[in-house]
Amino acid sequence: MRVLLVLIVIAVVLVLIGWVTVRINGNNQATVTVETQKIEQDTHDVVKNGGQAVKKAGEAIRESVEQKPAESPMQ
């Protein structure tokens, strides 16, 4: 029962984000379309943005390591 519920939730999420479309025709027929072009574009955008985020994080870490450590007031 849980597996069925998880599959239904996944299907609803895919419809909501536009990766799957459902069209109901007039004579008791339905068409389910997987929007592969949209999936490719979205995954490309995620990879690109993820790469930029990793690069920015690396630069921030590099800058913080290269800075001189502050002298402690106990010295």
Image (tube, grey):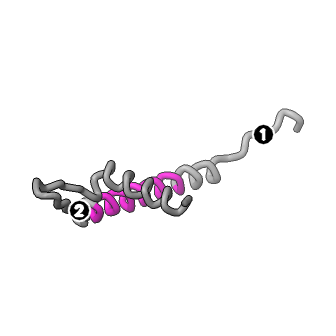
**Disc 1, SS:** loop
**Disc 2, SS:** strand
Q: Find out whether the residues at labels 2 and 1 contact each other: C-beta distance under 8 Å.
A: no
Badge 1: few (under 14), some or many (20 or more) residues near its Cα, within 10 Å?
few
Residue at 18% across / 55% down in the picture?
Answer: 23
Q: Amino acid at mark 2?
A: Val
Is 21 within the magenta?
A: no
Front residue (pair 17, 75):
17
Is 52 within the magenta?
A: yes
Disc number lying in front (2 or 1): 2
Instruction: Check the image and report above or below for 75 versus 38.
Output: above
| Horizontal side, residue 8 vs residue 58: left or right | left
Residue at 39% across / 62% down in the picture?
Answer: 47
Badge 2: few (under 14), some or many (20 or more) residues near its Cα, within 10 Å?
few
Instruction: Check the image and report above or below for 75 versus 61.
Output: above
Give the CA distance from mark 2 to mark 1: 65 Å
| Horizontal side, residue 28 vs residue 51: left or right | left
Q: Which quadrant would the N terminus be assigned to in this image?
A: bottom right
**What residue is pinned by disc 2?**
32
**What residue is pinned by disc 1?**
71
Residue 69, horizontal then vertical, whole percent: 72, 45
User: Most prominent secondary structure in the magenta stretch?
Assistant: helix
Looking at the rendering, the stretch of residues picked out in magenta corresponds to 39-58
| Horizontal side, residue 19 vs residue 9: left or right | left
Residue at 10% across / 53% down in the picture?
Answer: 26
Residue at 42% across / 56% down in the picture?
Answer: 8
Q: Residue furthest top?
A: 73
Residue 21, horizontal then vertical, whole percent: 24, 56
